[in-house]
Amino acid sequence: MMSTGHLNSVENGVTSDLARICLQHQFADVVFIVGQQQQRIPAHRAILAARCDVFAAMLFGGMREAVIGHEVCVPDVPPDAFRNVMWFLYTGECTVNTDSGM
């Protein structure tokens, strides 16, 4: 059986690895077009699906977003708020910004 210390070090290593690829184009297989500014935000389908049932249904179900290489438009969400959601899904960390409400 693994010790708690070992599990914490593994978790910290995984979190660090996921933080490194969050919002990066390296290995990304989906791009979200976000906000009225239409900012391109890269992501990794498997990570999003593993962390969120909504993304799992969207990216691996029968929806048009399930097509590999398809860009997903999210026009009604500010890009900074979307990036914060991505950061949370990848790392489990949430940053509160009193200026933006996130």
Image: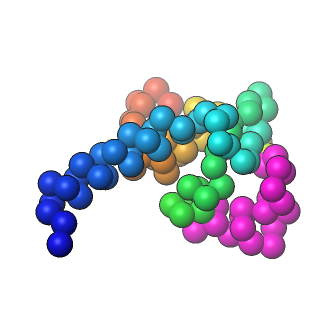
16 over 48 or under it: above or below: above
- Residue at 74% across / 30% down in the picture? 39
Residue 7 appearing in the image? yes
- Say if the magenta span includes residue 66: yes
Tell me how the rendering is colored.
rainbow
The quarter of the image holding the N terminus is bottom left
- Residue at 72% across / 48% down in the picture? 29
Residue 64, position as x, y percentages in the image: 85, 62
77 over 63 or under it: above or below: above
- Residue at 54% across / 39% down in the picture? 22
**In the picture provided, is 95 more to the left or to the right than 59?**
left
Number of marks in picture: 0
Residue 78, position as x, y percentages in the image: 65, 35
Q: Nearer the viewer, residue 33 or 101?
A: 33
Residue 93 appearing in the image? no
Residue 67, position as x, y percentages in the image: 83, 60
- Residue at 54% across / 63% down in the picture? 50
Q: Nearer the viewer, residue 90 or 102?
A: 90
Q: Nearer the viewer, residue 67 or 79?
A: 67
**In the picture provided, is 67 more to the left or to the right than 88?**
right
Name the residue furthest front: 1
Residue 99, position as x, y percentages in the image: 46, 26
91 over 99 or under it: above or below: below
- Say if the magenta span includes residue 1: no
* Segment tinted magenta in the rendering: 53-72
